[in-house]
Image (spheres, rainbow, N blue to C red):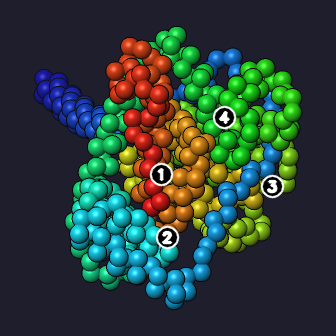
Amino acid sequence: MKIDSKKSLRINLVFDKCKTVIVLSSVVCTLAVLICLHKLLVYEVKFIKPFSPLPAGLYGNYLEPVIEGSPPVVSTKRHDKATDAEAVASLQAALEMKKIGKADKALKLFQHAFALSPKHADILNHYGEFLEDTKKDVVKADQLYTLALTNFPEHTGALMNRQRTASIVENLDREMLKKIDEKRDALLSVPESNAALRRAKKEAYFQHVYHTVGIEGNTMTLSQTRSILETRIAVAGKSIDEHNEILGLDAAMKYINSTLLYKMRDITMEDILELHKRVLGHVDPVEGGQFRRTQVYVGGHIPPGPSDIQKLMTQFLEWLNSEDALDLHPVRYSALVHYKLVHIHPFIDGNGRTSRLLMNLRLMQAGYPPVIIPKQYRHLYYKHLQTANEGDVRPFVRFIAQCTERTLNLYLWALSEYSHMVPAIGDQHILSDIEFDEDAL
């Protein structure tokens, strides 16, 4: 009996230990599930349904794409003492006109002073104050204060003004991004099977290709671009190079859609090189998908030397895949992706197209359609890139945000059920309820 009782006691102890292990294991598993759910809630933006841009029926091989044209060279003026003196005199006259209430004359004089000496801190500061006080344009004023501090960090007036406007402009930017997100959510709510959505995707895809190659100087019309993509038949009177630009971009977009879009993982160096290889095609098999080995010059911007490219691209990828970068709003993040890559200018050619494609990849993964940058605003596109090179990337981010909203407007307008999201639906400027800023600033 004693032996049986001892065995029973041991068995009970074993059962008790097993129960304890099971309870502890359940607690650990529950905690693990809760942690995973928390991470999913915190980073839910990463799991938004990607936006597939490709309409059905656009297939076929592509010809050898051509080398991308460089952006127009921005002429630089020598600012001698006489020019600076004239700029200061124009500034004084502008301040006098402002004082007596002649705002229109004051604006022209400020613009003249700014054109003569665009880095003069006093001119930038007073011009910003004029725009803020008279035109109520806090965004432009803040941009001028920032530029003044970039050239003269100890400028007291610009520093005080910038401290006042910085938070205001940030709030305005957040409101703009919030409105864009609402339009994105409305578009994502449309079923993929919706016939109007399929038609809108097809039209938007043609427009995306047309405007993207148009920025590089391609002279094909929208109807000719559509014909090439649908039929693969050459257009009479147009060069092979222009055909290849269209077909090369089409091939790169299809590579993104079939290979990268649905893989929610880190972007690698090989991904960027493969994307560039398709942009450049088989015209130059030595340079396609390879970093440049010579120095290049892009207007007023001198990119880093070839010996620095590998290191800079490694740093770029570390930032691109970092949590700090991914925590940014998708539009801000994608615009910075574009700017950082095109600033390094890692390839001998095809940098602009590759940068825009990588930007659109990240946007599509966040649920936005690929951004259409209208070819008629190429001058603003390059101007804002130049402003970013001078130290203020925010105007470029806002420009990309405006292009994103215009693209969303195109889709929502095509979907009549959701057209109330677009103001002034009957207006001729249907693609934009925010006009691009084309002022001299």
In space, the residues marked 4 and 2 are separated at their CA atoms by 33 Å
| Pair 4/2: label in front | 2
User: Along the line of sight, which residue is nearer the eye, 346 or 6?
Assistant: 346
- Mark 4 secondary-structure assignment: helix
Which labelled disc corresponds to residue 210?
4
Q: Quick check: 419 above or below 28?
A: above
User: Along the line of sight, which residue is nearer the eye, 415 or 92?
Assistant: 92
Say left or right for 206 vs 37.
right
**Circle 4 crowding by C-alpha within 10 Å: few under 14, some 14–19, many from 20:** many
Which labelled disc corresponds to residue 287?
3
User: Along the line of sight, which residue is nearer the eye, 131 or 395?
Assistant: 131
Q: Amino acid at mark 2?
A: Ala
Residue at 65% over, 51% down: 352
In space, the residues marked 2 and 1 are separated at their CA atoms by 15 Å
- Mark 3 secondary-structure assignment: loop
| Pair 1/3: label in front | 1
Mark toward the start of the polypeptide (2 vs 1):
2
Residue at 59% over, 23% down: 203
Q: Amino acid at mark 1?
A: Glu
Mark toward the start of the polypeptide (4 vs 3):
4
Name the image quarter holding the N terminus.
top left
Which labelled disc corresponds to residue 438?
1
Q: Give the residue at mark 2.
A: 115
Q: Amino acid at mark 4?
A: Tyr
- Mark 2 secondary-structure assignment: helix
Q: Amino acid at mark 3?
A: Glu
In space, the residues marked 1 and 3 are separated at their CA atoms by 37 Å
Q: Quick check: 196 above or below 155?
A: above
Q: How many marks?
A: 4
